Image (tube, grey):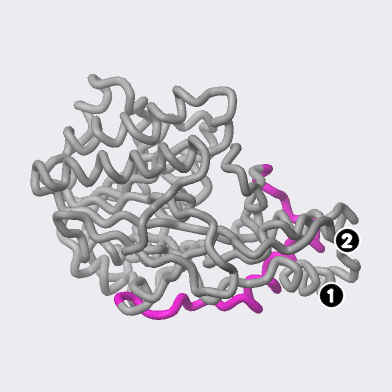
Amino acid sequence: MLTEPALEELLSRPTPEVTEAMGNLGGDLLILGAGGKMGPSLARLARRGSDEAGVERRVIAVARFSDPSLRDALETDGVETIGCDLFDRAQLARLPDAPNIVFMVGQKFGTTGDQPRTWAINAYLPGLVAERFPGARFVAFSTGNVYPLWPVESDGPTETDRPDPIGEYAQSALARERVLEFFSRTNGTAMVLLRLNYAVEPRYGVLRDLADRVKAGRPVDLGMARVNLIWQRDANAIALRALARCASPPLTLNLTGRPAHRVRWLAESLGTRLGQEPVFHGEESATALLSNARRMEALFGVPEVGIEEMLDQVADWVAGGGRSLGKPTRFEEREGRF
């Protein structure tokens, strides 16, 4: 099993394409909402890619940083940090101007019971940020949850298919896209909107959820019969490379891997690696939350890490007692209640 520092190094190791992209990119990079599951590794990836390209650039991670140790670790790795409540207009105004922004702010879990805050974070806050940085290039993370459930025998919806979000989290995520698109069209702000599902690394993600259940002998729900997956570094690498593709109106991309995998097969594959027979619950439905990533592949190529390597990495980590971030994806939720 990898150690945690070795895992962090792996997740932030630049590909040649990232190094080239960071070399061609002009100006500093501001990462808003950098304290979440993907933000720290994206910040390190940008820092290392810039260094390998020989480019002097400020890579600035902005978050509330409720965990001071994360802030210290990023600073040690050469990433500048700024503690900021983006709802505070005065704090937002004091952020340094930067021509490149990766927007990673969002709320999913805790929506049920606190819907107003979810809407404020996902739909109101993006407008404040877009208004503050009208001349920047924006790569903004969204979610594949903006799509309806789709037939499992298909490749899933494309970016031209009509969104039809289920539940208030997904509705507020679509509102985020619409608000950003409004400011893009109004101010000419160049943007890319990334509809992500689902990022994977050993400490969280669909495969970690399944591995924990298999290892513990807990039933795996088959209702959401298939899922699309992408290794976290591949998702972050595409996000950084997408800064060169920003446009007004925004370019929208499904950010994930193909094909969608059967949840039953994923659980059985993890069970083989963990020496534990999975237990299943329910029946496979004819629809699932899917995304067709052909447009992304046409621009950036097929993600580097395939499903077998993802399964190996996650199974090794779980078998060795590697820690979890404690943030289940709840990928099996079909009613949009988060």
Q: Is residue 224 magenta?
A: no
Reply yes or no: does residue 306 show up in magenta: yes
Q: Amino acid at mark 1?
A: Thr
**Is any atom of residue 225 visible in this view?**
yes
Residue located at (40% from left, 60% from top): 45
Percent coordinates x, y for residue 66 in the rendering: 51, 29
**Identity, as a three-letter code, of the amino acid under mark 2:** Val
Dot 1: few (<14), some (14–19), or many (≥20) neighbours within 10 Å? some
- Whether 114 is drawn above or below 288: the answer is above
On residue 272, which mark appears?
A: 1
- Which contiguous range is marked in magenta? 299-326
Residue shown at the point (36%, 56%) measured from the top left: 162
Residue 336 lies left or right of residue 304; in this view the side is right
Q: Write down the quadrant of residue 127 in the picture.
A: top left
Image check: 229 left or right of 314?
A: left
The residue nearer to you, when weighing 180 against 65, is: 180
Determine whether, in the image, residue 56 is placed left or right of residue 166.
Answer: left
User: Dot 2: what SS?
Assistant: loop
Q: Residues within 10 Å of mark 2 (few under 14, many from 20)?
A: some
Which of the numbered marks, if any, corresponds to residue 279?
Answer: 2
Where is residue 248? Give x, y as percent: 14, 55
Residue beneath the point at 51% across and 44% down: 166
Q: CA distance from mark 1 to mark 2?
A: 13 Å
**Residue located 42% across and 55% down the image:** 42
Residue 86 percent coordinates (x, y): 33, 28
86 vs 53, nearest the viewer: 86
